[in-house]
Image (tube, rainbow, N blue to C red):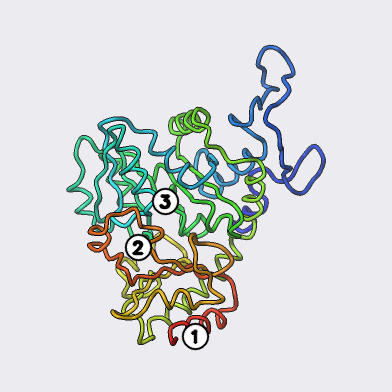
Amino acid sequence: MKFESLLIHGGIDGDASTGAVNVPIYQTSTFKKSEFENTKDNVYEYSRTGNPTRAALEKLITELEEGYAGFAFASGMAATTAALSLFKTGDKILISNNVYGGTFRVLDKYFKNFGLNYSVFDSSNIEELKNNIDDSVKAIFIETPTNPLMGITDIEEVAKIAKENNIISIVDNTFMTPYLQKPITLGADIVIHSATKYLGGHSDLVAGLVVVNNNELAERIHFIQNSTGGVLSPFDSFLLIKGIKTLALRMDRQNSNTTVVAKFLRNRKEVEKVYYPGFVDHPGHEIQTKQAKGYGGIISFVLKEGYDYKKFLESLELITFGESLGGVESLICHPATMTHAAIPYEMRQAIGITDNLIRISVGIENVDDIIEDLIKSLEI
């Protein structure tokens, strides 16, 4: 089955017992047992452990990512926390140097309390990765493209190095989705999604997904999911399945709109620099072209020194100034005070997350309207 059809018919397609086209919302906390002893008929016992609506979603994301098993969580950070919970005191995680601020925060402010260590490195530099590996390193956690500077990492190379050193490779695939990029087929062990973003696609839910490539990791993640309890509700699972059905259509439109907007911004006198992997001269463009079938819907750009970025953001009307990304509507944010505020000022400055850096998630509106809104706000 082709991917576009799999989005609609993958996982559990409809409801066999009634013929319903959509998987029902099994809004229940518990399930009746057929016998005292557990039998194969007692597939479900309690909705924290397993729920049919959530199971349909988990099977769907597994098939889309071509993994072994999938797990749905109450948020992207719950999914990330579950993956990081695989490790113990004294272990070290290597993370991309402009990883999402929430990932940095949970490592720096939460897991560090339990002796889980981390080290930041430039994941686009394979030699730097090799130089950072020691006996304490148990995982490599990357985003590609990175948030918000759109740094590109060669997933296949990272996965290869990880396997050579008996290290788990984890890829946050939120920006690309399995429609554009499949880290597990490139050798990664674990894929994470903030499904709140492109997979949901309508800014109406908060969810996280984890997909693993083998049975051992599946058993461990399921134990963490069940024992810590950060599961996705049946209703939000239903909404996410619904959102995923239109992923290809939305991503195609967002990809095409983003290319137009990126070229527009690059030609504006108010803009110092544009970060967009679709540009031939963007660092890692060739790798992105090799490992993904598109460049995504995110652009970051730097307004020239002295330009009033606050006034620019507050003047937008069509484009929504707010957190998040990946919705059908265009969303714009200020990373230094929003998504990456948890990262220390000196670190932000060193990697390029400056006060005049803006990130835009391009939506599916008419691209002329998006550009008109940008022109009006840039010229105020």
User: Is residue 321 depicted above or below 220 in this figure?
Assistant: below
Residue occupying image coordinates x 29% and y 35%:
116
Question: CA separation, marks 3 and 1?
Answer: 35 Å
Please report whichever mark, 1 or 2, sits nearer to the chain's N-terminal start. Answer: 2
Q: Give the image quarter of residue 109.
A: top left
Q: Residue 376 carries which label?
A: 1
Question: CA separation, marks 2 and 3?
Answer: 20 Å
Please report whichever mark, 2 or 3, sits nearer to the chain's N-terminal start. Answer: 3
Q: x%, y% of residue 88?
A: 32, 30
User: Is residue 371 depicted above or below 56 in this figure?
Assistant: below
Instruction: Give the class, few, some or many, for how many residues have Cα within 10 Å of label 2's Cα (few <14, many ≥20).
Output: many
Q: Foreground mark, 2 or 3? A: 2
Given the image, on which type of amino acid does mark 2 rest? Ala
Residue 1 appears in the picture as rendered: no
Residue named by callout 3: 172
Q: Report whether 56 appears left or right of 218.
A: right
Q: x%, y% of residue 207?
A: 55, 47
Q: Residue 336 carries which label?
A: 2
Given the image, on which type of amino acid does mark 1 rest? Lys
User: Is residue 242 depicted above or below 253 in this figure?
Assistant: above
Q: Report whether 205 appears left or right of 66.
A: right
Q: Report whether 302 appears left or right of 322.
A: left
Given the image, on which type of amino acid does mark 3 rest? Asp
Instruction: Give the class, few, some or many, for how many residues have Cα within 10 Å of label 1's Cα (few <14, many ≥20).
Output: few
Q: Foreground mark, 3 or 1? A: 1
Q: x%, y% of residue 216?
A: 44, 30
Local SS, label 3: strand
Please report whichever mark, 3 or 1, sits nearer to the chain's N-terminal start. Answer: 3
Q: x%, y% of residue 196?
A: 54, 53
Residue farthest along the left direction in this orientation = 131
Query: Between residues 3 and 262, which one lies in front from this camera angle?
Result: 262
